[in-house]
Amino acid sequence: MRSQASQTLPWKSGDMRPASALLAVLLWAICASASADDVNVAVAANFTGPMEQIVPEFEKATGHKAVVAYGTVGKFYAQIRNGAPFEVLVSADEQTPIRLENDGMAVPESRFTYAVGKLVLWSAKPGVVDDKGDVLTRGDFRYLAIANPKVAVYGAAAVEAMTKLGIHTALEKRLVVGENITQAYQFAATGNADLGFVALSQIYKDGQFAAGSHWMVPANLYSPIKQDAVLLSRGKGNPAADALLNYLKSDAAKKVIRAYGYEF
């Protein structure tokens, strides 16, 4: 008795070449499905733009899926300590991954620097920020946005820069503090703050700055923003987690990262 499958085959009996081709496709699909995994990723808010470009390319290249959350590193640290199911941390600093290693919550020797960030003073309005940052000392503005320096790396860098310039105390009452660097950028972008300290990646792409005015804060005014990625203990043994970290080291990912003004 012929099987139901053989009764519906559209090729002549005895010709197994189409069946072999179909079987190969089915086996490939099954294997691809079996080998595809998800990875839960915590990503620093300043890296939102590049990561939104990297994730689809990573998924296309590997077949894995990345489930991404964006936020401040300080809050991610607390969440990971309290059992959040993240498997990879793409941090805005190097200290937090090191702390997680010391806490036994990250895999030793998996940490690496994927980018070096830059701090920028920016206003959505042309002519507000001069190319030397003198607007800060003149004080001819109402509000200055920064990210929360207690949990956000770029916020801490902004405070460090203002302190070295000797203006932090004088400007303290004018600060509008965002939960993270994304919110600080939004304050400046919407005009709720006249200007703000933001990440270069938020106002720069492919050699072009966003509309408005900006000052590249000199590197000697704040500690280097070395951004490290690390495999968390929950991600150990997950092929998708390993694949994502490897992809961040690839030329394809570096091209995207560089386009947003990061260095290595």
Image: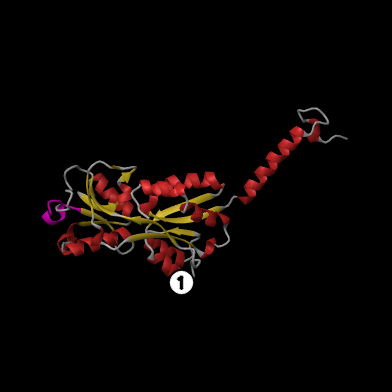
- Residue range of the region highlighted in magenta in the rendering: 135-143
Looking at the rendered image, the quarter that the C terminus falls into is bottom left
Q: Where is mark 1, residue-wise? A: 103
> Is 264 covered by the magenta stretch?
no
Which image quadrant: the N terminus?
A: top right
Q: Nearer the viewer, residue 126 or 117?
A: 117
Q: Position of residue 65 (x, y in %)?
A: 53, 49
Q: Secondary structure at mark 1?
A: loop
Q: Amino acid at mark 1?
A: Asp
Would you say residue 138 sits in the magenta stretch?
yes
- Residue 20 position, x and y percent, is 75, 37
Horizontal side, residue 216 vs residue 167: left or right: right
Tell whether 2 sits left or right of 91.
right
Which residue is rendered at x = 17% and y = 53% of the image? 133
Q: Is residue 152 visible from the viewing direction of this image? A: no
Outermost residue to the right: 1
Judging from the image, the colouring scheme is secondary structure
Res 12 visible: yes
Give me the residue at 77% from left, 28% from top.
11
Total numbered labels placed on residues in the image: 1
Q: Residue at 46%, 69% (x, y): give it.
A: 101
Q: Position of residue 161 (x, y in %)?
A: 22, 61
Residues 217 and 154: in front is 217
